[in-house]
Every structure is written in C-alpha cells, then in structure tokens.
Image (tube, rainbow, N blue to C red):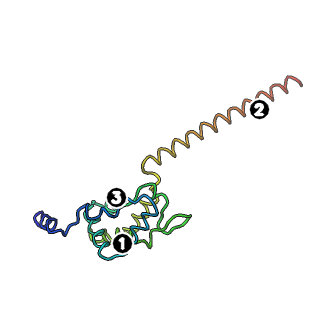
Amino acid sequence: MLQSLHRQFVEGQIPSTSSVEHFNLPIDSFEDFDRVESLLAEKSQAHVFISYLETIGGITAKDVISMMLSKLLTCELATNCNWMGKGHKTGMHSSQLAKAVIDAAKKSGIKEAESICEIKKWLKNASDREGGRLKRMKNKMDKERKDEATHRQLYFMNFDSSSTSDDSG
C-alpha cells in the first residue's frame, strides 16, 4: 500500500501542495472566492483540486469536512456564508467549491447527504472558532454586570426616594 502511494506521488498522480498554490488558500475574500470558482469551472483544475482535497484526510465525516474547509476558507469569510444564502450571506449550495468538497469526501466513502450536513454545521459554527465563542461569552458577562449595576442603582434610588417621602409624611 505504501509503495503504491509512493509510486503515485513520484509519478505525479497525487498532487502536492504546490499544485494548488495558484488557488491561494485559504480563501479570505469574496473576490478570491469568485476567482477560485472560475478556476474550478475548468475540469482539469477541478480534478487537481479534488485530488488535493482527498489527501487532507480525516477519520469521521466531521473530521474530513472540517479539515477540508479549514484549509479552504478563513473563519472570517466562513461567517459570511451559509448553505442556502439566507440572511444576506453567500450560499454555498451551488458553488464549485462545495461540489469539490463533496466529491473529494465521496472518494473517502462519505455520502453526499452526510457531507452536506457537515458543511452546514461547519459554516454555522464558524463564528465560534478563533475566539468567537469566548468573545461572545465575555460580552454577555459584561452586559450582565452592567445590567446588575444599573438594577442596583435603580433599587437604591427608589429606596432613597421612598425613605425621604416617609420622613416628610
């Protein structure tokens, strides 16, 4: 098996990272996304790209899709995408990129429906990566502290006004 893989690599059948350098991965802008889409519209480019994606590997469907997408899209770009393109986001369902990921995953034995499900989850959770979840949690705690301080201030203002009205009565 290893000899077969080595022979395929030497003969150029297994693409190296340099064979996809012109894709400029990971994609970090919609301009680059459109450029990659144009490249993938060419069958020869799509074949090289899919072959590269196959080499990324993984154990479970989640691992395979997650590792592929992590190599392809920055988290910042992924937060502006979803599967169907709802909510002013870019849809991935009809993209050449998604098709390439699904095709590469199929060659790893992953069914199309499972790949789509994992792509959706990966895009949905993009905002949690690279500190996003921690940042949201910190913002929430800051807001709760501020709300608590405001509530305490209002409570004591009401307490002070009620105690002064009792003195005057």
Residue positioned 12% across, 67% down in the render: 7
In terms of secondary structure, where does tag 1 sit?
Answer: helix
Instruction: Give the residue type that dot 1 points to.
Output: Leu
Camera-side residue of 36 and 6 = 36
**Place of residue 18 in the rendered image (x, y in percent of width and height, measured from the top left):** 25, 61
Residue positioned 47% across, 53% down in the render: 127
The residue carrying mark 1 is 40
In terms of secondary structure, where does tag 2 sit?
Answer: helix
**Place of residue 119 in the rendered image (x, y in percent of width and height, measured from the top left):** 40, 64
As drawn, the label of residue 162 is none
The residue carrying mark 2 is 158
The residue carrying mark 3 is 71
Image mark count: 3
Asked whether, in this view, residue 29 is left or right of residue 143, the answer is left
User: Which label's residue is closer to the chain start, 3 or 1?
Assistant: 1
Query: In the picture shown, does residue 142 fall above or below 8?
Result: above
Instruction: Give the residue type that dot 3 points to.
Output: Lys
Depth check, mark 3 against mark 1: the one in front is 1
